[in-house]
Amino acid sequence: MMETRSSIQRLSDFFVRNRIRLTTILVLLLIVEDILEGVRPRDLVSFQDLWGTSGLILVLLGISLRSWAAGAIHKGKKLATHGPYTITRHPLYIGSFLMMTGFSIIIGDNENIWFILIIFLLFYLPAIRNEELELRRKFREEWLSYAKRTSLFFPKKIPANILSNWSLTQWVKNREYRACAVSLIVLIMLGLIREFQVL
């Protein structure tokens, strides 16, 4: 029994440590699998295809939220309580979820939404739990006060200092340009595949 729990914990730790890499690979595999099966991506820029436009909006919202958070957070140095961190404790994860959901909608395979939920449950919820425990241990009263006034995911209210302290230098330091670049490349590829029926 103890050995089984230890194995599950090791697997969970592996998912948490490698969540970004694993998520990227799995989402790209879902897209490739659908394209190879002949699923044609939705039209991203036609208002006649509201699903395609909605998917694009979700991806762009996710990129924007992640970029906003990455330019505001100083990981490991101080507790982020400004900018997007005034409305949710986990804007980076919410941004990732929006991006994954948007790509699933663009592809148009409804089964992908279930895979995205499983990915979020396996990779991100344990990461959130671990991070919150670590932040509580490290910042104590400051964390407790912050957690009390700021929602886990959905905003309780929109505070006045929501736009403060974004830094391009911090955005680059947190390497958020990688998520932006990969997302934009995938969007362009999906647009080209739809336009020219490449596969």
Image (spheres, helix red, strand yellow):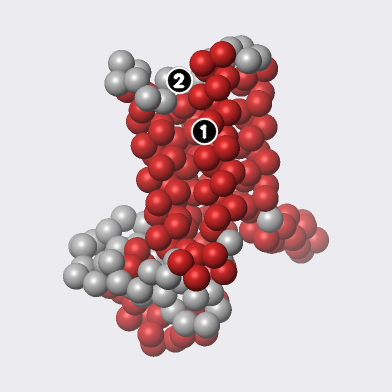
Query: Which mark identifies residue 42?
Result: 2
- Single out the residue that lies furthest toward the right: 3
Q: Nearer the viewer, residue 39 or 181?
A: 181
In this rendering, position of residue 112 left or right of residue 158? right
The answer to whether residue 166 is visible is yes
Give the residue pinned by disc 1.
187
Observer-side mark, 1 or 2, equals: 1
Q: Nearer the viewer, residue 5 or 70?
A: 70
In the rendered image, residue 106, in percent from the top left (x then y), is placed at 46, 27
Secondary element type, mark 1: helix
Quick check: marks 1 and 2 in contact, CB under 8 Å? no
Q: Nearer the viewer, residue 121 or 71?
A: 71
Q: Quadrant of residue 35?
A: top right
Q: Quadrant of residue 183?
A: top right
Secondary element type, mark 2: loop
In this rendering, position of residue 122 left or right of residue 135? right
The answer to whether residue 150 is visible is no
In the rendered image, residue 114, in percent from the top left (x then y), is placed at 52, 32
Separation of marks 1 and 2 at Cα, in angstroms: 11 Å
For residue 191, above or below residue 143: above
**Residue depicted at 61% across the width and 21% down the height:** 34
**Residue depicted at 30% across the width and 72% down the height:** 164
Count neighbours of disc 1 (C-alpha within 10 A) and say few if under 14, some if 14 to 19, many if 20 or more. Answer: some
- The C terminus sits in image quarter: top right
